[in-house]
Image (tube, grey):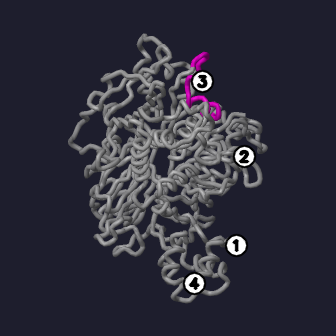
Amino acid sequence: MKNKTYSIFGAGASGLYTAWRLLNGETTSEQHQSKQLNHGDTLELYDWGQYDFTNKHKGTRAAGARVCTWHYQNDKTKSYLELGGMRYSEWDGKNEAMSGGHRLVTTVIKQLDLDKYSVPFNESTNPLYYLRTKNMYYNDISETNPAPYNVKNDGASQPPDNGFNIVESLAVTKDKGPKTRAEWCKFYQDGKITADMPESSVFQKGDLLKNIGYWNLMFDQLGSEGYNYTNDGNGYTSNVINWNSAVAFQANNEFTPGTEYKTLTHGYSSIFNALFNAIVKLAKQKGVNFEYSPNTRLHSILEIDNVIRYSIAKREHPDKKSATKTTDAAWMAMPRGSLDLIAEATRYEDHKGLDVLNHRKVQLYLESAVLQPSYKVGMFFNSPWWMATAANPPAYPAPIISYEVTTDVLKALGAEGFPQQYLVDIQKSKNPVVIETPFASAADLISNVEKCIGVPLTAGQQAQLLAASERNTIGPSVTDTPIRQVVYFGNNALDKTAKPVYGILASYDDEQFTSFWEELEYSTDSIEKIPFSENYQPLIGPRKAPEVMIKMLRQQLAAIHFGPEADYSIVPEPLETRYMDWSLPPFNAGYHAYAAHYDICDVQQKIRKPSQLIKGADANIFIVGEAYSNDQAWVEGAFCTAESVLNDFFGIKPIIDNKEYPFICPCS
C-alpha cells in the first residue's frame, strides 16, 4: 500500500494537538485503520513563525501561537508574564453533565505529566476599579457609594457585572434555562426571550436570541449609561460588541469575580513544548517521518483531479509561492485572518479544480467568526509597588491577597505535621466547602476551616495554614482608560534564591483600544517604514516598548493606584517592558466571537470540513482552531475542534468520554 502524507498548517494549539492525536490515537474500528499513520508515512507540520520548541528547534519566541509566555531577560528560571492566552479552567474528572472546566486541556496536561506544575490563577473576589476618575473596590459599590454612572433603576449601586445578569435574565435564570454544555448548544439554535417585554422595548418575547446583536440588546435593556457601565467595568470590550446574543449569554458567565482558573508554573507556553516533544517521540516510535518546517506558510490550496495540491511560501517572501506539493489530507490549524489570506491567493484567478475556501457558502460560514483585536503590555519591576505592604504604599492597593487551600497546600501542611484528620476533613469538606475555594481574608479562611473540622485551630496551626495558602496574584484591576485591565503576576520565578523580580500585565485590552497603543509603538521622531500587512511582530515575539509607551503606562497606572491627580513618576521605572499586538498579521485578532444571524451549531459542524458545504464535493481539507469552536478565545476550543475532526472523519476514539461533553455543538 502506498505511503500517505498528512499535512498540518499551523503549529499552535490545534495544529500540535492534531499531530499528537494522529500519532497516539486508537481507531474505533478496522475500517478506519487505513487512515492511521503507520511506519513509512509522513506527517508534515508547517509553522509560519519559528517557535522555541526545543534545544534542537530553537525559535524567536515562546511556543503557542496566541499563547506567549515571556520571561524576564528571556531566562526561563526568572519571573514570567503571559502576553497571550494565560489560563484554563480545571476539570474535576467527573463525567457528569454539570461538571465544569476545560476537559481536554485538563486531560492533555495530565497525560503529558504537567499537572504537577498546575497552580491556581487567582482572580480577586474584590477587584479594584478606576472608572470615570473614581477609584473604588467591588465590595464598596453601594447605594451610598455608587459608581459614577447615571444608570436607571439605581444600577450604579450594583457591581458592573450586574448588567450581564439583567440582560441574561430575559431568557436564563438560576431556575430556568440551559445548564449543561449540550443544553447551551440547543439554546444557541432556539433560545428565545421568555420575559414579558414592555411595548417600548425594541425586542419582544419570543424573539430568537441568535438573531439579535448583543450590543443592541444591552443598549435596549440597560440604556446608554447602563451599557457604558457594564462595558467599562467588565474590562473586556470584546464581550459587549454586537455579537450573537445567544452565545454571549453563556460566554459572559465566565467573566465574573470568583471564577476559578489554573495555569502552569513554567508558563502556559510549556504545554506546547511538551506536546511538540511528545510528537517527536511518538513519530520515532511508530516509524513515521515527522517533518517540521518553520518560517513556512500555506500560500494556497486546491483540490485538482481528487488530489490536494498546496503551495507554500517562505518567511522572506510570504506572498510568493516557493513550492507546490500534494498531500492526502490537510489541516488548516489557523484563525480566520490567516484563512482569509489563503483564500485571497486564488480568489481572483482562473484555475482548475475545487477552490474550497472561495466557495460562496464556505465564505458565508467563514465570516461567522468576528475578528477581535487585542493588545498586551508586560512590565517587570524591582518591587511590588502596587501592594499595601510596599515601601510607599498606594492609596488604592491591588486587593490580590487571598487564601486558597489546594491539594498541594494539603500536601505541604501534611509534611509540616498538620493533623492528618484535619487534612482529611478539609479534603472532603462540603458545608462549608473549603478545598479549592478562594477566601478574601485570613479570618474567613480560618473560620471556615474551623467549622469544617469542628474544633478551633491553635495559633501555630493558624500560622501554618495561612502561610501555605496565601496568594498574592492575579487581580485584575479594571479601568475605562486604555490600559483596561492590570493583572499582577508578581514574583513567580522558578529560582526562588535569586533576587526577586515582580511582573504585571500592565495593559490587557481589546477592540478599539488596541489602536491607542499601536501609535505608541514608535518614538515621537519616527515615521512608518513597514506596511501594516507586513508587520509580523506576533511571530517574532514580544517587542521592546519605547519610552513614550512606558510613560503613558506609568501615567495610567498611577491614576489607578494612587488617584486621578497622581503624577506618573510615583510609579517606578520598570526593568523591562514589552508588548504583543495581536491585531497584527498573521493572526489579525487575539480571539474571535460568533456573529448574530447564524446557526452556530451548523457552522461548527460544517466548517470543520468545508467541502461539506459544497454539493457533490468531498475534499480532505479541514479547518481546526479556536475561531469556529464552542470555546472561542480558549485553548480548549482549539483542542475540541481538532479532536472532533479526528473522531468524526478519521475514526479515532475520543480522548475522553464525550457523552456529556460534546466537543462541538451537535445540530438538532
**Most common secondary structure along the magenta stretch:** helix
Look at label 3 and name its amino acid.
Gln
Q: CA distance from mark 1 to mark 3?
A: 51 Å
Sort mark 4 into few (<14), some (14-19) or many (20+) by Cα contacts within 10 Å.
few
For residue 88, above or below residue 388 = above
Percent across and percent down for residue 374 are 43, 44
Secondary structure state at the residue bearing disc 3: helix
Of circles 2 and 1, which is in front?
1
Q: Along the horizontal axis of the image, is 6 left or right of 407?
A: left
Q: Label 2, on which residue? A: 170
Sort mark 1 into few (<14), some (14-19) or many (20+) by Cα contacts within 10 Å.
few
N-term mark: 3 or 2: 2
Q: Along the horizontal axis of the image, is 435 left or right of 542?
A: right
613 part of magenta stretch: yes
Q: CA distance from mark 2 to mark 4?
A: 50 Å
570 part of magenta stretch: no
Percent across and percent down for residue 132 are 48, 55
For residue 349, above or below residue 650 = above
Q: Which residues are magenta?
A: 600-617
Of circles 3 and 2, which is in front?
3
Of circles 1 and 4, which is in front?
4
Of circles 1 and 3, which is in front?
3
Of circles 2 and 4, which is in front?
4
Look at label 1 and name its amino acid.
Asn
Look at label 4 and name its amino acid.
Pro
Q: CA distance from mark 4 to mark 3?
A: 61 Å
Q: Label 1, on which residue? A: 431
Q: Which mark is residue 612?
A: 3
Look at label 2 and name its amino acid.
Leu
N-term mark: 1 or 4: 4
Q: CA distance from mark 1 to mark 4?
A: 20 Å
Front residue (pair 88, 360): 88
